[in-house]
Amino acid sequence: MNVGTFEGGQGVNMVPDAASVGVDIRTLPGMDHQALLDRIGKLLGEETKLDVFSDMPAVWTSPKTNGCKACSRSAGAISARSPSRAPRRTTPTRATC
């Protein structure tokens, strides 16, 4: 999860009447997006509105594909060593509240 933006108010010495937070959540394959959104909504409370503008399932690319092998070779050549295996990659799922 990445909290990317905060907005609210017009001055540092004024209490804003509203505020927003931009959050990017990248899920793993098999995660239940609706359950995640329900849990976040419950944690934030009834006065908070979740505005989901992108809800895509997570994807994973095998490190054995030609593209991943090429990236690994390039990274190894640049860093003069083989890169360690990274966890499965995902696509972004964003929730803005």
Image: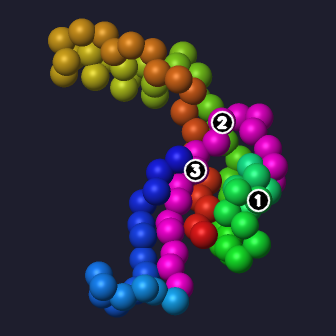
Mark 3, Cα crowd under 10 Å, few <14 / some 14-19 / many 20+, is some
User: Residue 69 falls in which quadrant of the image?
Assistant: top left
Label ID, residue 4: none
Please name the residue shown 58% across and 45% down the image.
26
Instruction: Kindly identify the residue that appears in the image at 59 percent across and 59 percent down.
Output: 94
Residue stretch in magenta = 18-35
User: Where in the figure is residue 64, as x and y percent of width and height?
Assistant: 54, 16
State the separation of the CA atoms marked 3 and 2.
Answer: 10 Å
Residue on which the image places disc 1: 42
Q: Position of residue 29 (x, y in %)?
A: 71, 34
Location of residue 8 by image quarter: bottom left
Find out whether residue 29 is within the magenta segment: yes
Report, in whole angstroms, how far the alpha carbon at label 1 lies from the one at label 3: 17 Å
Which numbered marker is on residue 25? 3
Q: Residue at x 42, y 70 (%)?
A: 6
Q: Is residue 53 visible?
A: no
28 relative position to 6: left or right: right
Q: Mark 2 sits on what residue?
A: 28
Residue 63, horizontal then vertical, whole percent: 52, 19
Of circles 1 and 3, the one toward us is 1
Question: In the rendering, at what x and y percent does residue 55 appear?
Answer: 69, 58
Label 1 crowd bin: few (<14), some (14–19), many (20+), radius 10 Å: few
Q: In this figure, which colouring scheme has been used for the structure?
A: rainbow
The amino acid beneath tag 2 is Leu
* Residue drawn at point x = 19 percent, y = 18 percent: 79
Nearer the camera: disc 2 or disc 1:
1
**Quick one: which residue is furthest to the top in this view?**
81
Instruction: Establish if 59 lies above or below 47.
Output: above
